[in-house]
Image: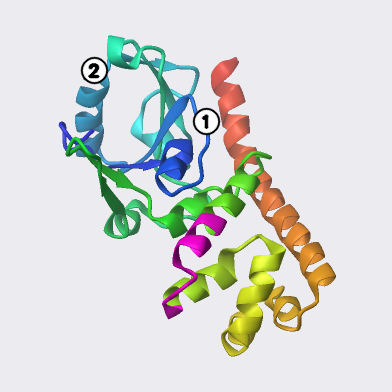
Amino acid sequence: MRKHRVRALLMGGQACVFYGAAEFSRDTDFAILADAANLARLRKALADLRAEPIAVPPFELKYLRRGHAIHFRCQHPEALRMRVDVMSKMRGVDAFAKLWRRRTIIELPDGTKCDLLSLPDLVQAKKTQRDKDWPMVRRLMEAHYFLHHAKPRTAQIKFWLLELRTPQLLLAVAQAHANLARRLAAKRFLLRHAASGKLAKLERALADEEARLRAEDKAYWRPLLKELERLRHPK
């Protein structure tokens, strides 16, 4: 991707590993800029990987802009059978230009640089209807908390209050920063339970929050899935 200057941000399970939440993943997922010039660069990168499209939808700009993922299988010997999935639009996630400005750049020991979704954007992208994504959100937030909790900045505390999913940690942060928690309760109502130390109510509210977000994701995908069915079974 970097060789061909593709505007692409690593996300999914591979990105989670970089952020300290280990996950086994057979796929490499990218958020990409959906414009004609970037797709031309992406086609060159995929050609180097000997990557062939699999399933539906076709590799066309209009499907990326509507929110579909497009899937490829690599045949290059050094990436044999690796699946590459690309998306441009995701529910509740900002437009690519903002994601790119906020990106995380990580340099590997060999000097290779990787462009990743920022952690807040990755957490947002993981709030789906899939069972496997919610434990990952929890682990991502725990890893960030334990890395920075000794000397946190205000922005980090705010991030934890809005996104932590571990009841005990959320309770501890809310009680240590009660004023901030009360102010942010307008955005995340369950912080009222956390600030007042009501663990049982907080646990129920976290479960309700997850159920609501899963339902929103299902509603978002319903028309997209119908479109995929039409592509699979054209009249």
What's the residue at 67%, 60% (across, down)?
166
Magenta region, residue range: 142-154
Image quadrant for the C terminus? top right
The answer to whether residue 163 is left or right of residue 15 is: right
> Percent from the top left, x then y, of residue 182?
64, 86
What's the residue at 29%, 9% (across, down)?
77
Give the mark nearest the N terminus, 1 or 2.
Answer: 1
> Percent from the top left, x then y, of residue 130?
65, 39
Locate residue 203: give its quadrant.
bottom right
Element type at marker 2?
Answer: helix
The count of marks equals: 2
Q: Nearer the viewer, mark 1 or mark 2?
A: 1
Element type at marker 1?
Answer: loop
Q: Is residue 115 magenta?
A: no
Does the image show residue 187?
no
**Distance (Cα) linking label 1 and label 2:** 26 Å
Image quadrant for the N terminus? top left
Can you identify the residue that label 1 sits on?
24
Kindly check if marks 1 and 2 are in contact, taking CB atoms under 8 A apart as contact. no
Q: Is residue 144 magenta?
A: yes
What's the residue at 36%, 12% (across, down)?
80
In the rendered image, the vertical position of residue 208 relative to residue 96, given as above or below: below
Q: Amino acid at mark 2?
A: Ala
Q: What main secondary structure does the magenta stretch of the protein show?
A: helix
The answer to whether residue 197 is left or right of residue 115 is: right
Q: Residues within 10 Å of mark 1 (few under 14, many from 20)?
A: few
Locate residue 5: give its quadrant.
top left
Which colour assignment does the render follow? rainbow
Can you identify the residue that label 2 sits on?
47
> Percent from the top left, x then y, of residue 138?
61, 53
Residue lying farthest bottom? 179
The answer to whether residue 225 is left or right of residue 41 is: right
